[in-house]
Image (cartoon, rainbow, N blue to C red):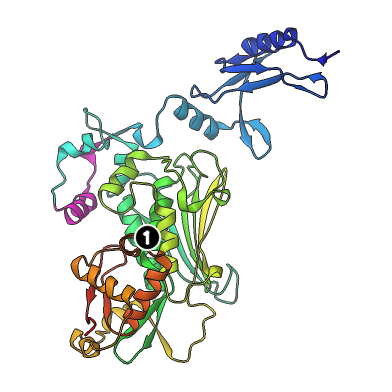
Amino acid sequence: MRTGCSSGDSEKISETIKAKMDPIPSFSFSFPVEDGKRFLLLHVNPGNETPYYFTSDGMRIAYVRVGNESIPADSIALKRLVLKGSRTSYDSLISTQKKADFAFTKLRSVYKNRTGLDFQDSNFSSFGLADENGYLTNAGLLMADEPRLRHSRVFCTRWNGLNKASGIMDAIDDHEFTGSLISLMQDSVAFVMNNMKKKWRKTATVRVEYPDYPERAVQECIVNALIHRDYLEIGSEVHVDMYDDRLVIWSPGGMPDGSLVQNLNLENVASKRRNPLIADLFGRLDFMERRGSGFRKILEDYRFEENFNESKNPVFRSDPYSFSVTLYNLNYGVNDGNTGGETSEEVRKNIGRTSEEHRKNNAIEINPTQKKILELLASNPSMTAVELSGQIGIASRNIEASIRDLKERGMLVRHGSTKAGYWEVLSEEK
């Protein structure tokens, strides 16, 4: 004889849910049997009409899941639930500020420089930065030269040592940046570039540089922190903390879907944007990937560097309230008697060797893979290691190793940044 739950039990539970939940969530029951016992399983389906309230004895409470427990939602959590339920994002909300009262000099100049087009007044509406009455959305307010959002700031600090209290002088350099999101991104990246060093090593034909941090990886991380942060957290800002051995970029708000980034496959993370209007604009400006491959590109940038090993892999962590990425200093702990070091400013002032000097090495024998790399880059200098890997049919890690060798032998040189630059083939096999 089977014992356990009955359909009468499910009816009582159903009645309780309908009486004490508002709105009523979608749910169903099943009655599996195990070891001669009949169980009742309640299935509550995901809902989009958030917040869902529990109502009883005059109380009306919404709960959120934190770890393995449910707790009453505070005011900020309720605002997030309301936005989700109304299928609205923070950056799309209409503010009380008129577009005519703000300047957008930075946005207009960068848009012209990055796209070759003038930023028209009609773009404010088409990009979701303002409504038809001239009122800015929060996205538009964040793009203004002076956004008047006190929490839209970035605190950058170069600490002295390995933590925030390492000696007599705790901080070597620090800045608090304000302004449009574009200015915050540019100023923060410049802070990191100016406070890091580049090692270098001279070969017979070329000087090979070893930056502490890949510039494109730094920019990608800072852009992500600004674009995906939770702007409902009024008393919190993005922080960029540099130590001797690492760079930590912290932003308020966890993953938009509540997942933990440390539990995900970083090579294949679905794009879920907390602030889609801002993200779309930065994508149009080519400051970030519009296909959600930012994590993968950061990892690729590191793997491409000469001093990379598995211990230098970037580390991403999140909880319900914050997100952080740790980029490790590629040169920390690397002792090489053949290398020197200088700041980014000194690197820019050093003119290096000329292309004519590189071309003197054009009789060096190369393997078939390297020959194919040179051929492809000669025809398309902007190709990436991943694209070369797809064309040649070998792992991108092997492509990167071949490129490093070609650079060392003076047969290939990189001009410009990792993302916006290009390759120059200086020598081919004879």
Q: Does 304 sit left or right of 259 as displayed?
A: left
What secondary structure is the stretch in magenta mostly built from? helix
Residue 422 is a magenta residue: no
The residue lying toward the viewer, choosing from 99 and 231, is 231
Q: Which quadrant is the N terminus positioned in? A: top right
- Tell me: residue 237, above or below residue 140: below
Q: 169 and 202: which one is in front? A: 202
Residue at image point 34% right, 38% down: 138
Snapshot quadrant of residue 297: bottom left
> Which residue is situated farthest in the right direction here?
1
Residue drawn at (35%, 90%) of the image:
203
Q: Is residue 204 above or below residue 417?
A: below
Q: Give the SS element for disc 1.
A: helix
Q: Position of residue 52 (x, y in %)?
A: 56, 22
Instruction: State which region is magenta.
Output: 98-116
Rendered position, 370 above or below 33: below
Residue type at numbered disc 1: Gln
Q: Residue 385 appears at what percent x and percent y?
A: 34, 65
Q: Residue 54's quadrant in the figure?
A: top right
**Which of these two is toward me, 187 or 265?**
265
Q: Classify 10 Å Cα crowding around label 1: few (below 14), some (14-19), many (20 and above).
A: many
Q: Which residue is mark 1?
A: 219
Measured as percent of width and height from the top left, residue 287 is found at 31, 54
**In the image, residue 101 lies in the stretch drawn in magenta:** yes
